[in-house]
Image (tube, coloured by chain):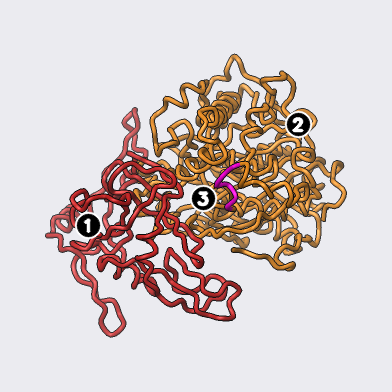
Amino acid sequence: MAATKKTASKKFVEPRVKVVNGQYKVSGNFHRIIPNTPIYNEKNKLCGVTNPRELTHIHSYGGEAIFFESVPKGKLMGAQCVNPDCEFPGTIWIPFRSCCADCLTRNKPVDITKVAQETGTVHSFMVTERTGAFNTLEIPIKFINVEFTHPNIDTILMGYLSYGEPEIGMRVVPIFKKKNPTFTITDLSWVPLGTPKSKLPKDFSF
Amino acid sequence: MITFSKEQLKIPKMSRDVYLVTAGESEFRRAFPEKRQEELAIDALTMAAELIGTTPAKLKKFIHTCYYGYFADHFGDQLLGEAVIHDRLGLDPLGNVGIKTGGATGGSALWEAVKAVASGYSDCTLALGWERMDEVPTDEGNNYIACAADKDWETPMGHIYTGYYAVMAQRYWQIFGKSEPSFRETMAKIAVKNRGYAIHNPFAQGPMKITVKDVLESPIVAYPLRALDCCLMSVGSACCIVADKKTAYKLTDDPLLVHVGAGSHSLRVADRRDMQIPLLPHETKEQYADLGKRFPGGDRYPGFSGFLAARMACHYAYGMAGVKDPTKDLDFVELHDAFTISDIQSYEDVGIRPYGEGRTYVESGDCYVINPKTKKPGKLPANPSGGLIGCMHAVGATGLMQVCECGLHLWKKHADIHGSEARWRSFGKKKPRNWQDLTIKGAKRALAISHAGVGSHVTATIVERPEARLKGGK
């Protein structure tokens, strides 16, 4: 156990990843060893142990990376099927997907920010004060599902409302975390149409 | 839009009949600090053996391949858990495989076990499922469950799965429930019923005598869903043994025919494009022509109110069993009541009620063992086990527990098993003084729905007494 304690007390260095020659090159600590502890029952008999650990995963966005890269630039990207022989040619997928689900050809990224600004509408919503572990959103979270009016868009994007109270049919516009982005879906949020700039959360803008 | 080819809609035709020989389940609890998962799996298999008057050792001699279901490696903190369980059950060196389809894992494990027998690869197979959800705190557990949503597009939104159902509840309540408080009360009645039925089930984790008011005043988890609208987080195991006719009758003189169909839909509700409602045998296109007029906003299918995967699973299973109208042809159902709202949604997907009219199944009293309005048996009782809300949701075991419970009624063993003082005692419980026999008298055919995520995978299992086989079954 002494050796474990020694390892656990090492200075933690934030994990970082670069891509070099097509390979991940990692630095820092991707896991941290924490000593385990025994679990006793009411009669003080051993019935188990804790198995603590902290670790960091690496994750590739692959062909969807352009979506997450565009959000902090104030752009909402969809993915359009450009195969004229597709059963449903011209479909714009949002959530963005690399390939068309119908014909499996590579989609073309298209900027749908204007469509979202001009037609974004709440399809449904919910409000929660309870979250699972690792939540980073402010509580209460107001989930909204946003539908768009466009002949080629037939899907409904999940998001969260950062100002006001949601209701079905409410017109909403996207806001983007342009400062200190996380490059996750939480960089994209929504506010009711007409929300003043002063009411946007820190680091977000239209 | 999704369109289907004739080939995709083909009703599966098995090469030979498959029979449910026996089934078993462990007790279900929120936590078992002093029991390993393997011990619970052994409890389930032992019950299955005892149910047909044999021993686990003798029963094992018939098993040829094994299909193991558990939803999350994370929860058990054990990759390849199927190898651990298989070893502890003493079934090496038989072939086995792990099955993972989220909340539908139990149903999917059975689906595979049935196909193995139907194909002739095996004459007798074991489908066994489990989940160990007590070895992380509840918020960590909620995070793990939310990891079954899309990790880039959905999970970061609060890491709580209930939220994904809450948006469905909101939309359904406003469109089909017309925003009426009475609809919210109907949802609550499901929680009252299922937790009430669990009082009479010794295996159940969440028995409660509650009222509609209790449900409506319970803490909000994700508005409009409250704590008592939600299923349990459980630990436990369940299993089914299936076999061909010859082997089945060697093991028991009372096997049941079993048919399983499966369907799927996108993991993200966001990706569900508007499409035509696939019809079940008793439905017509005309009956949905004015759906949007009767329920403004309700003409988008499946939208946020239907589960296409459940509809497809029933298309295949009803075709295999020859079910034309579920309310007429089935005697009871065990539905996947993960949340009160999803229970109502499922009534429509499986064809108990037309789309838009699910609430009437509860409000008419048809879904009760004894209809509270007529004081007579309900037309099609739902979840006499207590379901996921009252009995358990040990995810990988759930679909198998449901089929086990269906079997107990059809085998006329339900009262003996649920009413046994010794069984209550063995679980450290006292048989309630007001214990009721919830046996569905004369039941010949039942349906169990096993459902994943917000409808990504669904299986429909029909078990029926062989002498009551419907005409038209494949």
Residue at position x 61%, y 74% from top? A87
Quadrant of the snapshot with the C terminus of chain B: bottom right
Amino acid carrying label 3: it is Val
Q: Can residue B455 be seen by looking at this rendering?
A: yes
2 and 3 marks on the same chain = yes
Q: Using the numbered discs, state the Cα–Cα distance from disc 1 to disc 3 in whole angstroms.
A: 31 Å
Q: Earlier in the sequence, mark 2 or mark 3?
A: 2
Label 2 sits on residue: B412
- Identify the hue of chain B: orange
Judging by the rendered image, the residue that carries numbered circle 1 is A204
Q: Which chain is red?
A: A
**Where is B377 relative to B6, above or below?**
above
Disc 1 element:
strand
Pointer 2 local density, CA inside 10 Å: few below 14, some 14–19, many at least 20: some
B245 vs A84: above or below: above
Residue at mark 2 to residue at mark 3: CA–CA distance: 34 Å
Circle 3 residue: B454
